[in-house]
Image (spheres, grey):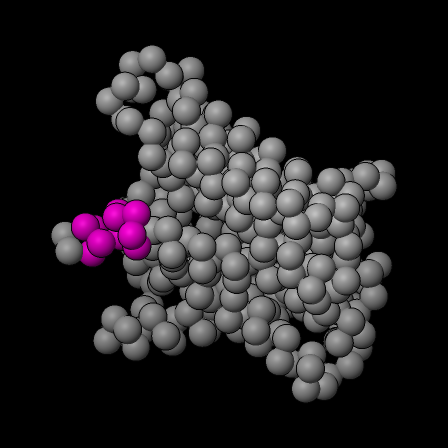
């Protein structure tokens, strides 16, 4: 009960979700840098899948080791929990990141960050209409629209340039896969440790993607310190962010946590500019406006008076 009381308070939820968003936002440019350091071409699908598999298998090992130390017991799945981790790995790792890695290589970091932000809408729709773990309300829809408008505003110069199904289309399918994984985490974590689920689904999914990449002829073009360090960093991003995010989803509604995901592309745009020199037409004033809209969207979903909305805002 003590853990519940802490992880449902805004004072804990806000800094933890922002940490996750900062880590995930850094993944946009860092994946591209990882490709560059490891000599993986933008059209080398097999090597991209191999790279993703290595990252997530390592992330799973890190999550399980650290989680076991924190829990003072080994986080080993039971016969009952193993199928859950396997199903979760299909959506959270195999489908989401196969689509994401291939799509990101064929799009810009800025365009990908905008499309990925649709996972907030999709997560709420999947949780409300398919899994029915919460109600879809006007407040949630309005908050998503306001927050997404901030994401679009900060990416004004990154949303043009055409559409490729294997680029932008795959990034969208990645976002849809994430939406299903968020709903599954919410359902499964009511009975299972979310860190155990995240760790083992990464190991299962990462191992599958590594084997698939090798079978398709993928390879790491260059093995050097920079490439290895970037791969380890990306593994840490996944291990830390997904473990924290999954724990928060266990104790809070999907809509409450997912809406903070609008900060991912904000961090992604800023870091893409700093690390990749991907420039946007959005100046400092535009960035401030975008952050204001994102913050307002989060406030609408999480801080509106509950008692006044329950009867009037259901769709």
Q: Position of residue 53 (x, y in %)?
A: 62, 66
Q: Which residue occupies 40% across, 44% down?
A: 257
Report the side of 141 relative to 102 (left or right): left
Q: Position of residue 182 (x, y in %)?
A: 45, 44
Q: Quarter holding the C terminus? A: top left
Type of secondary structure dominating the magenta stretch: helix
> Is 9 within the magenta?
yes
Q: Is residue 211 visible?
A: no
Report the side of 8 relative to 207 (left or right): left
Q: Position of residue 60 (x, y in %)?
A: 47, 68
18 or 240: nearer the viewer: 18
> Is 311 within the magenta?
no
Query: What's the magenta region?
Result: 3-12
Specify the farthest residue to the bottom: 225
Report the side of 206 relative to 260 (left or right): right
Q: Which residue occupies 54% across, 70% down?
A: 235
Report the side of 21 relative to 249 (left or right): right
Specify the farthest residue to the left: 1
286 or 12: nearer the viewer: 286
């Amino acid at each position: 009960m003590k853990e519940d009381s802490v992880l449902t308070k805004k004072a804990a939820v806000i800094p933890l979700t922002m940490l996750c968003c900062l880590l995930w936002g850094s993944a946009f440019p860092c994946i591209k840098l990882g490709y560059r350091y490891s000599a993986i071409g933008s059209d080398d699908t097999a090597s991209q899948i191999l790279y993703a598999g290595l990252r997530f298998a390592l992330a799973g090992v890190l999550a399980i080791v650290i989680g076991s130390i924190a829990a003072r017991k080994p986080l080993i799945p039971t016969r009952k929990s193993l199928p859950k981790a396997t199903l979760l790995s299909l959506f959270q790792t195999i489908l989401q990141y196969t689509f994401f890695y291939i799509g990101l290589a064929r799009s810009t970091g800025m365009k990908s960050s905008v499309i990925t932000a649709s996972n907030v809408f999709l997560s709420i729709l999947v949780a409300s209409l398919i899994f029915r773990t919460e109600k879809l309300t006007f407040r949630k829809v309005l908050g998503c629209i306001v927050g997404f408008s901030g994401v679009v505003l900060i990416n004004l110069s990154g949303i043009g340039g055409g559409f490729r199904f294997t680029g932008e289309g795959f990034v969208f399918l990645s976002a849809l896969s994430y939406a299903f994984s968020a709903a599954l985490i919410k359902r499964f974590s009511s009975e299972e440790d979310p860190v155990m689920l995240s760790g083992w689904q990464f190991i299962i999914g990462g191992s599958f993607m590594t084997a698939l990449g090798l079978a398709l002829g993928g390879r790491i073009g260059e093995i050097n310190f920079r490439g290895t360090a970037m791969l380890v960093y990306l593994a840490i991003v996944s291990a830390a962010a997904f473990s924290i995010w999954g724990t928060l989803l266990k104790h809070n509604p999907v809509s409450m946590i997912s809406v903070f995901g609008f900060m991912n592309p904000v961090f992604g745009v800023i870091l893409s500019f700093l690390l990749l020199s991907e420039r946007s037409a959005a100046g400092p004033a535009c960035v401030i406006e975008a952050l204001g809209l994102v913050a307002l969207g989060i406030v609408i979903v999480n801080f509106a008076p509950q008692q006044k909305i329950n009867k009037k805002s259901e769709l």
